[in-house]
Amino acid sequence: MILKNNAEVPEAPVEEEEVKNVLRKILIGPEDGSDNIIMRHFKVLPEGHTPFHNHSHEHVVKIEKGKGIVVRESGEEVLVSQGQSLLVERNEKHQFKNPFSEPFEFLCIILNPEKLG
């Protein structure tokens, strides 16, 4: 069993195209011996956003703190806040945005993309 203190996990900026003011922690992943599942913590700072993108794996998201906007594939923007969870399906375009003054934090759990054929 691996037990970690989330506060001690290093946080790093996400440096990808079309990403603004997003920090990420890999809470549990391959480096911990979890070959198939990765649990990540994202912090979207005020005025930050992820890209409007899709990928071949589904993921589950649990809003941990604050509030933000989830952009659906249709372009519809949905307000989400602490205590809510969502499923982003395979190949579904989506985006997370924070137009608010406080950080927006969520857990994102995925299957390891390197293990998916």
Image (cartoon, rainbow, N blue to C red):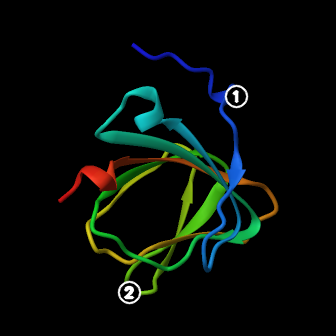
- Amino acid found under the numbered disc labelled 2: Ser
Q: Quadrant of residue 16?
A: bottom right
Q: Which residue is mark 1?
A: 7
Position of the N terminus, as image quadrant, is top left
In percent of width and height, residue 59 lies at 34, 55
- Few, some or many residues within 10 Å of mark 2 (<14, 14–19, 20+): few
In percent of width and height, residue 54 lies at 38, 75
2 or 1: tag closer to the N-terminus: 1
Q: Residue at x 51, y 44 (%)?
A: 40
Left or right: residue 63 versus residue 115 is right
Between 74 and 115, the residue placed more toward the observer is: 115
Between 45 and 115, the residue placed more toward the observer is: 115
Q: In this view, which residue lies farthest toward the right?
A: 101
Count the marks: 2
Find numbered disc 2 in the image and state the secondary structure of the residue it sits on.
Answer: loop
Residue 73's label in the rendered image is none
Left or right: residue 112 versus residue 13 is left
Find numbered disc 1 in the image and state the secondary structure of the residue it sits on.
Answer: helix
Left or right: residue 83 versus residue 22 is left
Q: Residue at x 27, y 68 (%)?
A: 56
Mark 2 or 1: the one toward you: 1
In percent of width and height, residue 49 lies at 64, 71
Q: Residue at x 71, y 69 (%)?
A: 48
**Is 29 situated above or below 45?**
above
Between 115 and 5, the residue placed more toward the observer is: 115
Kindly report the distance in space between the C-alpha atoms of the residues bearing marks 2 and 1: 36 Å
- Few, some or many residues within 10 Å of mark 1 (<14, 14–19, 20+): few
Q: Which residue is mark 2?
A: 74
Q: In this view, which residue lies farthest toward the left?
A: 117
Position of the C terminus, as image quadrant, is bottom left
- Amino acid found under the numbered disc labelled 1: Ala
